[in-house]
Image: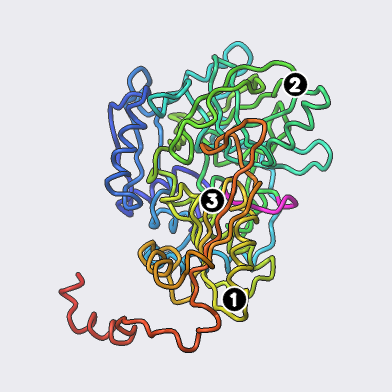
Amino acid sequence: MIQTDLRDFLAAVDDAGQLKIVNGAHWDKEMGAVTEVLYRQKVDQSPALLFDDIPGYPKGWRCLYGMLGSPARLALALGMDAQAAGDRMAMLNDVRKKMALHEPIDFRTVSDAPVLENIVEGDDVDMFKFPVPIHHEADGGRYIGTACGVITRDPDTGRVNMGTYRVQAIGANKATSYISNGKQGMIQRDKYLDAGKPCPMAIVIGIDPVSFLAARYTLPDSVCELDWAGALTGGPLDVLEGGLTGLPIPAGSEIVMEGEVSPTETTEEGPFGEWHGYYAGGARPEPVITIQRIYYRNNPILTCAASQKPPHSHLFERCFLRSAALWDSLDGAQIPDVRGAWVHQGGSGRTFVVVAIKQRYFGHATQAGLIASQINPTGYCGRYVVVVDDDIDPSDIHDVLWAMGTRSDPKTDITLLDKCWSSRLDPMVKSQDELYNSRCVINACIPYERIDDFPAVAQTSRELAREVMDKFPDVYS
């Protein structure tokens, strides 16, 4: 069952042995450090961490890290059998096929939800009422929005957007947010600001797993993330109408803030340890968000994502979702016989991408690689794209490196591209006025002219592998 309530989901996670309660860790750097050390040891086999008894805050006011940070938890969130998590490409393709069968379903407005148990507004608004973390040692402040959903509405088309953009708490009722250039949230926000008008905004900082998946998925501009969530669950996602902004708020939320972005007032935002494991981008002025109202459940849970040097606690689901979206985009671009795609964790979920194809014609591999280097979701801040044959598992880095080392020629199989889409967060960007980077596309497929006479692979057949596993089960237990 796909859960649209965080607490129901956590109960399922706990039943699966995937949840760890941590008591007494401090909001000032300790929670982020505990999470980083664990995930560096166990990577995507780590449990979700639910921090309680946070110093200075009531018991039961908790912070959650690594909500979807393992294959098993992601399978639970997607309503799949946890056993499906053992084969990443099969799991990836199952999700794609499921979504291909469902059209987006309009969200449904309801009048009541547990998040309405507590409402504060005006002078009573205080973001530091919650255990807002400092995630990394050199962060510029406390970040309330990391594993969050920032909701805006396009003033021209009415399209609602929900994306995961970082939100820094500056004061009791003042925040600011960094949104990368080209992202829908920034485009919508700036339409208001460029017209001299405040931008209404809702920020979900205790987000349910389905809404979080939707906020992180790369969708066509015409599709609302809340409607995509409905397609995932097979029914409309319940939302509340924000009393101040009129924006739709997922009813399964733990904590929601409503406010508006100023067209004139700015404040320094950052630095923040970001997705690639660097403090790139520094601190720069960003528009001020005035928080006018906060809704929250009793004993609220703040969902958190601390990006560190890979691997880290929210990297697996990022890689999975971007891999699915890339595969969809390549199919949409009519690249034939794409058999898999993986956006690798070691590449911070952006900079090292592998596409597997069944070669059909001369130039097929180059075509797939060039398109993958520019198309969403890998066009933004990408770096390396490797194209491999369909006998290579694109999620297995050993398989990929083997293909690169034995099927590609450095002189003829590497293509370089200049002036591609980047960001001020890119540690290799030299000027904040020229947000470009370059791309490298590596053809690690068997040369098409030799596809029938290339040396055979020395590997046990699948049939014999299954036979010996069945015959000697103790070896593999």
Label 1: state its secondary structure.
loop
Q: x and y percent of residue 118 in the render?
A: 54, 25
Among the two numbered marks 3 and 2 on one chain, the one whose residue lies closer to the N terminus? 2
Q: Which residue is mark 3?
A: 383
Left or right of 210? Residue 375 is right
Mark 3 touches mark 2? (CB < 8 Å)? no
Quadrant of the rendered image containing residue 97: bottom right
Q: Which residue is mark 2?
A: 263
Q: Which residues are magenta?
A: 213-223
Dot 3 crowding, Cα within 10 Å, few <14, some 14–19, many 20+: many
Q: x and y percent of residue 352 in the render?
A: 48, 54
Left or right of 472? Residue 9 is right
Label 2: state its secondary structure.
strand
User: What residue is shown at x 19% (from left), y 77% (from top)?
Assistant: 473
Among the two numbered marks 1 and 2 on one chain, the one whose residue lies closer to the N terminus? 2
User: What residue is shown at x 60% (from left), y 28% (from top)?
Assistant: 177
Q: Is residue 355 visible?
A: no
Q: Which residue is mark 1?
A: 337
Q: CA distance from mark 3 to mark 1?
A: 24 Å
Q: x and y percent of residue 350 in the render?
A: 52, 49
Task: In the rendered view, tell whether residue 36 sits above or below residue 261.
Answer: below
Q: Amino acid at mark 3?
A: Arg
Dot 1 crowding, Cα within 10 Å, few <14, some 14–19, many 20+: some
Q: x and y percent of residue 369 in the render?
A: 59, 64
Q: Is residue 6 visible?
A: yes
Left or right of 174? Residue 5 is left
Q: Is residue 344 magenta?
A: no
Task: In the rendered view, tell whether residue 32 sits above or below residue 474.
Answer: above
